[in-house]
Image (cartoon, grey):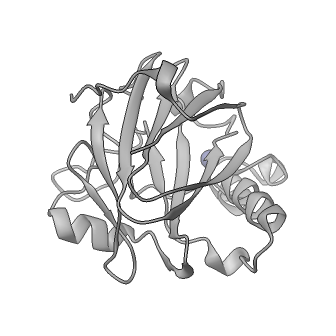
Amino acid sequence: MTQSKLDPGNAVYSATILAGDPWIHEVRKGQYFRIVDLHGNQAVDTLFYNAHDYSDRYSAQGTIQNQRNLYLSAGTQLLSTEGTVLLTITADTCGRHDTLGGACANESNMVRYAIEKRHMHACRSSFLKAITEWGRGLSKRDIPNNINFFMNVPVTREGGLTFEDGISEPGKYVEMRAETDVLALISNCPQLNNPCNAYDPTPVQVLIWDA
Ligand SMILES: [Zn+2]
């Protein structure tokens, strides 16, 4: 657990992302970016792009390989497909974040839960909605593997992926410093079929501080 010294009263930007909503915003080099799990155990599906070249985007594989660890926490450098350090996690009061589990989709709703869940709201649709509204040429094929902030997906000794109950609590946060100008894209997960959020998606807060 690493606490931040930054005062929310000095933030230059603050917004609440309602349960199930997408959010897209640029974070400039040197700025600090915090996500607050307001009610606890909310999954915050997140992607980052190099703001000057959207083809250079978050790489789960590169990030894991670079730190030789599967879990994200304070000290983790979030790497891009081109090896650019996009952001560094500087504070984390939750202690573990997932980048293996992927984002929920209409297709996974159907496969994991039931055929009739297909049309229920899912993260990949939220990502697509946000990048379409953002304009600037991003499309469905620009949605790579993502980070699931506040999600607990431990790997077993045998290498199995397990989706466990969350370890986050109301007010827990993760904070990172942008190491280059980045475009941040969030789907505040709308999933109603996964017990990780107690079947109850809730709002989160995002804050930005200048360097
Ligand atoms: Zn989701």
Which residue is found at the position 20% from the left and 48% from the top? 75
The picture places residue 26, in percent across and down from the top left corner, at 59, 57
In the visual, does 130 lie left or right of 108?
right
What is the quadrant of the N terminus in the image?
top left
Which residue is found at the position 69% from the left and 52% from the top? 109
In the visual, does 24 lie left or right of 38?
right
Residue 195 visible in the displayed image? no
The picture places residue 87, in percent across and down from the top left corner, at 36, 57
The picture places residue 172, in percent across and down from the top left corner, at 40, 23
Number of labels in the image equals 0
In front of the other: 178 or 92? 178
The picture places residue 104, in percent across and down from the top left corner, at 62, 53
Which residue is found at the position 80% from the left and 59% from the top? 129
In the visual, does 132 lie left or right of 45?
right
Task: Tell me where residue 190 sits by quadrant.
Answer: top right
Task: Tell me where residue 58 sits by quadrant.
Answer: bottom left
Which residue is found at the position 38% from the left and 36% from the top? 174
In front of the other: 13 or 40? 13
Residue 121 visible in the displayed image? yes
